[in-house]
Image (cartoon, rainbow, N blue to C red):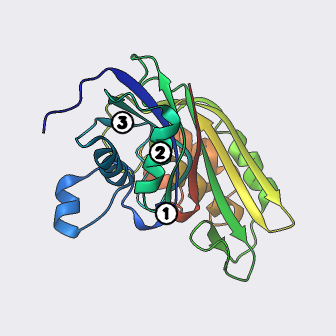
Amino acid sequence: MPPLTEQRNIKLVLEYDGGRYSGWQRQNRKEKARGEKTVERSVSAALRRLFGREARLTGAGRTDAGVHARGQVANVRISSKLSCDRIQQALNAFLPGDISVLSASEVPGAFHSRFSAKSKHYRYSILNRRAPPALLRGKVHHCSYKLDVDLMRREARELRGRHDFRAFQNAGSPRKGGTVRNMLSVEVKLNRADGIISIDMKADGFLYNMARNIAGTLIDIGRGRLPAGSTAGILESQDRRFAGQSAPACGLCLVEVKY
């Protein structure tokens, strides 16, 4: 079936539980071979049911397998005259319960969910207590050992500003577009009431697994696996081998994309 005539550009803000998905981006060969699901494929299927044909969907960030989102952004080009409220309502009726369209709005034709983005906000959540999570299972990374939050906070400050973050990119990742990013802010907070440590990272862009590798490094420093003062040296080294482990995907959430 031929694609829709590109007359309107619709911006979608999505929330999803990434637990049973192999990330955002469609991976046709992989999905076919292993029967894996992606969020993009599920949203595309809902769009196809709504409009009766394929519509081109573009996401702001390629969240990894198991990563969640509270504010993923995508845009789709359609020729339908349906109102944005009706589009949101209909898509939510067609989508599985772990994906929700929070809003739909018409935007200028030049808007691109990925290339128009000015910054992205990721949050990594750690449950720091002996008992494992029940209500937050699959939404936080459980650390039963005590973490030095003040030390983690001090180390996180070294990441602020414009740096080459290749030491926090997975080894062997493509370097198209370079590895320099501007980290606008990094904040480590402890909610003493529930024992949750949040690492909030805002940057003009993130390398592959950069957020999880930063979180894992700060965790390793907080538990004493890496010494105080490690962060600056890791940045300077530009070598992934010196950074900490990659933190599990379940603790990471794409909170917001700003334009």
Task: Judge from the rendering whether residue 118 lies leftward or rightward of residue 127; answer left or right.
Answer: left
First reached walking from the N terminus: tag 2 or tag 3: 3
Q: Are marks 1 and 3 in contact (CB under 8 Å)?
A: no
First reached walking from the N terminus: tag 1 or tag 2: 1
Residue 167, disc: 2
For disc 1, the marked residue is 97
Q: Is residue 81 above or below residue 73?
A: above
The amino acid pointed to by label 3 is: Thr
Image coordinates for residue 102, horizontal then vertical, percent: 57, 44
Image coordinates for residue 205, horizontal then vertical, percent: 50, 33
Residue 58, disc: 3
* Outermost residue toward the bottom in this view: 131
Residue 226 seen in the figure: no
> What distance separates the C-alpha of mark 2 from that of mark 3?
28 Å
Give the class, few, some or many, for how many residues have Cα within 10 Å of label 3's Cα (few <14, many ≥20).
many
Give the class, few, some or many, for how many residues have Cα within 10 Å of label 1's Cα (few <14, many ≥20).
few
Name which residue lies at 34% across and 30% down.
80
Q: Which of 253 and 94 is in front in this view?
A: 94
Q: Is residue 249 above or below residue 177?
A: below
The amino acid pointed to by label 1 is: Gly
Location of the C terminus by quadrant is top right
Q: Do the residues labelled 1 and 2 touch (CB within 8 Å)?
A: no
Image coordinates for residue 20, horizontal then vertical, percent: 42, 67
Name which residue lies at 40% across and 25% down.
9
